[in-house]
Image (cartoon, rainbow, N blue to C red):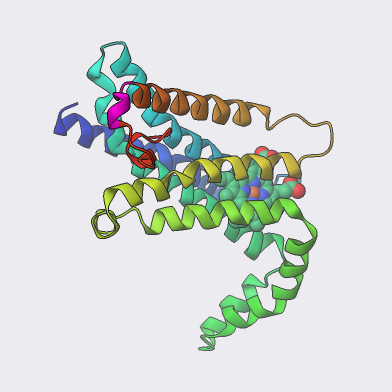
Amino acid sequence: MTERQILIGKTVAHVLCLMPALDLVRIYRNGSLVAQADPVNFITHFTGDWALWLLLAGLAITPLRRLSQGVGWQGLNGLVRFRRMVGLYAFFYATLHLLTYVLLFSGYNVPAAFAGLEAGRLLEPWRQLQIIWPAILDDVRKRRFIQVGFAAWLILLTLAATSPRGVLQAIGGRNWQRLHRLVYLAGALACVHYWWLVKTGVRTPWKVTAVLTVLLGVRVAFGMRKRNSIPPERRKKGNREATGVLT
Ligand code: HEM
C-alpha cells in the first residue's frame, strides 16, 4: 500500500468508525431515540455492540495480513497501520458504553449537574457522582457481568494509554508487544460479559465468541509455525518472547 492509499484508507476508516456515534446523535435529534421502548437500554446495547465489533475488527487485522502474505498477496500489508486506530475506536465506544451506564443507567442526575455548573458550582458533577456511587458499587458487587465488563474496559484503557509511539519507545518493543497481547483477554472478557448478561438459554453472543475463537486460533497457529521454523539450536530455553505463540 502506498502512503497515499494509507492516507485515503485512514480517512475512510475514521468516517466509518465515527458513523455509529453520528448515527446515535442523528436518531437523538430526530426523535427516533426517545421513541424506543427503552432509550437508555438502546444506547447501552448499541455502544456495547460497537465496542465489541471494533475490538474484533482490530484483532482480525494481523491474521488477515498474515493470511494474505501466505497466499503471496502483499496487498493487505498496510492494514497493520489501521490496527491502532481501530483499537482506539473500540475503546471510544467502550467508554461511551461505560458513561451510558454511569450517567444514564445508574440514575445520575444530569440536569442537576448541568444546573450546578451553570450556577458556577464546578464540583456539582462530582457531587452528583458521589450520590449514586453507593448504588453503582452495590450493582458491581451483585452483578458479575459488570465486573468482567469493567475488567475488559480497564485493559482497553491501559492499551489506549500505552498506544502512543513514545510509550512504545520508552518501554521497548518486546514489552509493548507483550502488554498489547492483553487485547485478546479484553476480547474474551467482553464475550464473557455478554454471555453473563443475556438470559439463560439466549445464544446471541455465540457469533462474536466464534469470531474471537477463530482469530485466536489463527494467531496461535501462526505463532507455532513461526516457532517451528526456527532451528532447535536457536530456540533457547526461556526465549519464548522471541518465538512467542502469539507474535
Ligand atoms: C466498562 C464497564 C462496563 C459496564 C458497566 C457495562 C455494562 C453493560 C450493561 C448494563 C449492559 C446491558 C445489560 C442488560 O441489558 O441488562 C451491557 C451490555 C453489553 N456490553 Fe457492556 N459494560 C461494560 C463494558 C463492556 C465492554 C468493555 C464491552 C465490549 C468491548 C461491552 C460489551 C457489551 C455488549 C456487547 C453488550 C450487549 C449488547 C447487546 O445485547 O446487544 N461492555 N453492558
Residue 81's x, y, as percent? Answer: 27, 37
Residue range in magenta is 229-234
Q: Quadrant of residue 129?
A: bottom right
Q: In which quarter of the image is residue 132?
A: bottom right
| Viewer can see residue 32 | no
Q: In this view, does 146 lie to the left or right of 57?
A: right
Front residue of 137 and 111: 137
Front residue of 199 and 21: 199
Residue 215's x, y, as percent? Answer: 49, 27
Q: In this view, does 133 lie above or below 170?
A: below
Residue 229's x, y, as percent? Answer: 32, 21
Query: Is 1 part of what is drawn in magenta?
Result: no
Q: Which residue lies furthest to the top in this view?
A: 71
Q: Is residue 94 above or below residue 125?
A: above
Front residue of 20 and 181: 181
Q: In this view, does 24 lie above or below 72?
A: below
| Position of the C terminus by quadrant | top left
| Viewer can see residue 205 | yes
Q: Which residue lies furthest to the front in this view?
A: 233
